[in-house]
Image (cartoon, grey):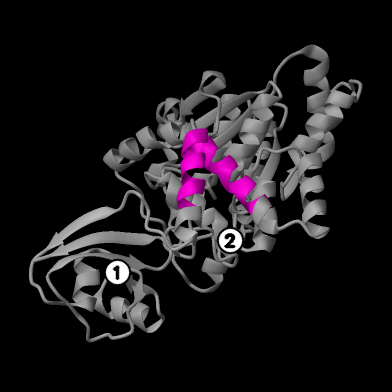
């Protein structure tokens, strides 16, 4: 690769690339690619592949999409790759069991909603959308065998999750070896300059570099982003752990969830989710350290995220709703529920009104002082609610106006 001058714009682009990332490999190669792009005016090709394994995305998924958007705003060509072919294999990354492959119908359903949600982060007018079945289906059995010949089993077994499963006598299906090969071949087909992914994708991203060299291409660089912690600040964000913020979530709920994170976790969210310039964040962090209320910074973060996925007016309304509830008020819009069977046991009422998943969970919530009726805390688990209409509150955010007959 020829040398090109390292201008101030190139240094700024390098700073944008590094922001919040876990690894950028090899940095020297990426710097040269940026310098060449700046000198020639030729945008770099930046690839992100996502398998449509579920129909919904949460803000943890958007960490890599945010990086993609930052690089897109620098003028580079971003490629949103839907792994409709690789989804039929199932990504073994970070798994201790074989991931069940999806049906074609599941893949198509999920893929339709994936990009609709990704457009909330990326600029759709400047995003190239591709499906890896375009080149993987025509590869055929002959092409697959030729591709598999370009990597050894010994190298494949260096991968941490495969090695652990082998050592514990946990089954590894032969088709799982094909997944990193096919993801790497995507980089060959797209001639990518940079591939993004989570830290758990490092092996697969490096496979792309290897295969591009095998096919006589300039190897891509790789950029891995951290896995975002959930609202609890401990486990990674996950719907199964109920510590997530869905990007299609109601604006009021999204705002309230963001206000619930710890002051320490707030800065992590700023780094990985906010588009505010780093000097601005450093200034804000300094002000909080000097005595400014950290809630001010949290409100700014919540407003930014709600505005991105909804609108500025929705952020205004969410802020008003949160403040109203903080003063003990009831949200302006709550679910209306009609139930028969008065008088009804409080545990059963909470379950039927879908304010608790079960009566046992409802009673646990009462023990914790988390249930209110018309603003009064319920402490009697044997309470029977008479006929009429009451406002029932569970925790800080769940409300329902329940009419019993």
Disc nearer the start of the sequence (2/1): 2
The reply to whether residue 91 is in sight is no
Q: Is residue 3 above or below residue 293?
A: above
Residue 202 screen position, x and y as percent: 64, 49
SS category of the residue bearing label 2? loop
Residue picked out by circle 2: 261
Q: How many marks?
A: 2
Tag shown at residue 356 = 1
Observer-nearest residue: 327 or 92? 327
* Number of other residues with Cα within 10 Å of mark 1, as a class: few under 14, some 14 to 19, many 20 or more: many
Q: Is residue 52 above or below residue 37?
A: below
* Residue located at (80% from left, 37% from top): 15
First to last magenta residue range: 297-322
Looking at the rendering, in which quadrant would you find the C terminus? Answer: bottom left
- Left or right: 281 with respect to 202? right
Observer-nearest residue: 127 or 289? 289
């Amino acid at each position: 690769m020829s040398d090109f001058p390292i201008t101030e714009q190139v240094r700024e682009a390098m700073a944008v690339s590094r922001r919040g990332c876990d690894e950028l490999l090899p940095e020297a190669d990426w710097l040269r690619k940026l310098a060449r792009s700046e000198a020639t005016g030729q945008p770099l090709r930046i690839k992100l592949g996502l398998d449509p394994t579920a129909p919904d995305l949460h803000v943890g998924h958007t960490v890599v999409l945010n990086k993609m958007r930052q690089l897109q705003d620098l003028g580079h060509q971003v490629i949103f790759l839907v792994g409709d072919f690789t989804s039929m294999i199932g990504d073994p990354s970070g798994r201790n069991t074989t991931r069940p492959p999806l049906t074609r119908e599941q893949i198509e359903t999920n893929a339709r909603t994936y990009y609709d949600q990704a457009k909330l982060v990326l600029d759709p007018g400047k995003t190239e959308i591709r499906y890896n079945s375009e080149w993987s289906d025509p590869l055929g059995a002959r092409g697959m065998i030729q591709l598999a010949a370009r990597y050894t089993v010994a190298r494949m077994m260096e991968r941490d999750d495969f090695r652990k499963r082998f050592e514990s006598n946990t089954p590894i299906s032969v088709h799982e070896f094909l997944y990193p090969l096919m993801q790497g071949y995507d980089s060959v087909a797209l001639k990518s300059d940079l591939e993004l992914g989570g830290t758990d994708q490092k092996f697969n991203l490096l496979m792309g570099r290897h295969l591009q060299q095998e096919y006589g291409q300039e190897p891509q660089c790789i950029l891995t982003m951290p896995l975002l912690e959930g609202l609890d600040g401990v486990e990674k964000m996950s719907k199964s752990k109920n510590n997530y913020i869905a990007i299609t979530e109601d604006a009021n709920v999204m705002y309230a969830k963001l206000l619930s994170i710890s002051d320490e976790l707030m800065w992590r969210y700023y780094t990985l989710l906010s588009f505010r310039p780093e000097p601005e964040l450093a200034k804000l962090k300094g002000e909080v350290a000097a005595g400014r209320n950290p809630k001010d910074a949290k409100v700014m973060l919540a407003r930014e995220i709600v505005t991105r996925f909804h609108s500025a007016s929705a952020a205004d309304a969410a802020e008003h709703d949160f403040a109203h509830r903080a003063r003990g008020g009831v949200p302006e819009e709550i679910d209306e529920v009609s139930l028969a069977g008065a008088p009804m046991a409080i545990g059963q009422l909470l379950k039927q009104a879908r304010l608790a998943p079960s009566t046992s969970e409802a009673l646990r919530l009462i023990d914790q002082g988390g249930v209110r009726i018309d603003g009064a805390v319920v402490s009697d688990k044997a309470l029977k609610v008479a006929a009429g209409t009451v406002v029932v509150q569970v925790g800080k955010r769940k409300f329902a106006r329940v009419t019993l007959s």
